[in-house]
Image: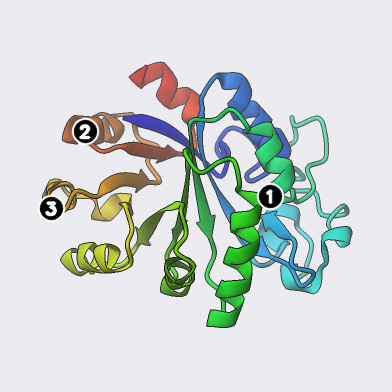
Amino acid sequence: MRIIGHRGARGEAPENTLGGFQYIQDLGIRAVEFDVRQLKDRALIVMHDDHFMRTTGQDKSLYECSSQELEPYNHAVTWSKWNKAEPTPLLEQTLKIIHNFEHIEVEVKAVKTQEDADQLTETLEQQLQGFEQVAVITSFDPKIHWALQQRKSGFKRGLLIETDVKLQAIEQALELGCCQIGWMNQLASPEMIQATQQAQLGISVWTVNDIDRAKQLRDLGINGLITDFPKLMMQHLG
C-alpha cells in the first residue's frame, strides 16, 4: 500500500503549497495528491477551494484572479511556526518540486460546462507531459473524464466517489474508462473494496488519518492511502 500525502501534507504543512510539497519531498515520500483549477487566463493553479477565505483569511474569489495576482494570498497565514509566506502555486511550479515522484494524483475540480472541461484538460495534458507513467488524473466531475476520453488521453484516470452510490460507481468508472476509484473513507467497506478489486480497478481511499483504520485498509489490499499526516503514517506503517 502506497502512502499518499493529501494536498501535500495538509496536517503537517500548509496545504497545496510549494513549501508543503517540498516538505513531503524531504520526508522521502514519493506519492502525493493535490487539486487543480484553471484561472481566467487559462493558467493552471494548485488550490482546493474556489475562494481564498479558508486558507488565507482574505475575502476573494479565486476566479476573479489571473496568474499574476496570486502573490498577496498567503496560505500559511494560520501556521504560526511556518517561517515563510506560501502563495498559490502554479501547476508548473509544483511539478518541478515533485519531478521524481513515483505516484501523483491530480484532482481536477468540477467545472461549469463541457467547454470549460475541454479547455482545462487540453492545458493539463500539455503541462503533465513527461509524467505519463506516474500521474493519475482524478475527478468527481464526469465532464472532466468525458473530455479526456474524447481526446483519447494517454493518462490514467480515477473516478472520485463521496456519495453512497456504491456499485453504480464501479459501473460508472468502467464506462468512463477509469483505471481506479478514489473512495471516501466512510464508503470504503470491505465489501466495496472487494467489489472494486473484482472489477480490476485500483483503489485509493481518502482521507485516512487514523492509524488503526490505515492498517485495516492495508490488510484489505488497497493501493493508495491518502492522508493528511504522511509522516505519521510512514512511522507506523513503514
The location of residue 127, given as percent across then percent down, is 66, 51
What crowding class fits label 2: few (fewer than 14 Cα within 10 Å), some (14-19), or many (20 or more)?
Answer: few
Q: Residue 107 in the image: state x and y as whole percent.
A: 51, 55
118 horizontally vs 74: left or right: left
Residue drawn at x 29%, y 63% as measured from the top left? 173
Q: In the image, residue 148 lies at what x, y percent?
A: 47, 65
Numbered disc in front, either 2 or 3: 3
- Quarter of the image with the N terminus is top left
Q: Do the residues labelled 1 and 2 touch (CB within 8 Å)?
A: no
Q: Distance between the Cα atoms at labels 3 and 1?
A: 34 Å
Q: Where is residue 136 in the image (x, y as percent from the top left)?
A: 45, 48
Question: In the image, 130: left or right of 209?
Answer: right
Circle 3 residue:
195
Which amino acid is tagged 3? Ala
Give whichever of discs 3 and 1 has the lower sequence position: 1
Which residue type does callout 2 highlight? Gln
Label 3: state its secondary structure: helix
User: Quick one: label 1, few (<14), some, or many (20+) residues within 10 Å?
Assistant: many
Crowd tier of the residue under label 3, counting other residues whose Cα lies within 10 Å: few below 14, some 14–19, many 20 or above: some
Label 1: which secondary element: helix
Q: Mark 2 points at which residue?
A: 216
Residue to which mark 1 is pinned: 91
Query: Can residue 78 be seen here?
Result: no
Compute the Cα span from label 1 to label 2: 34 Å
C-alpha gap between disc 2 and disc 3: 17 Å
**Residue 150 vs residue 103, the one in the foreground:** 150
Residue type marked 1: Leu
The numbered dot on residue 111 is none
Task: Give the image quarter of residue 219.
Answer: top left
**Occupied quadrant, residue 54:** bottom right
On the rendered structure, is 41 left or right of 206?
Answer: right
Of the residues under marks 1 and 2, which one precedes in the sequence?
Answer: 1
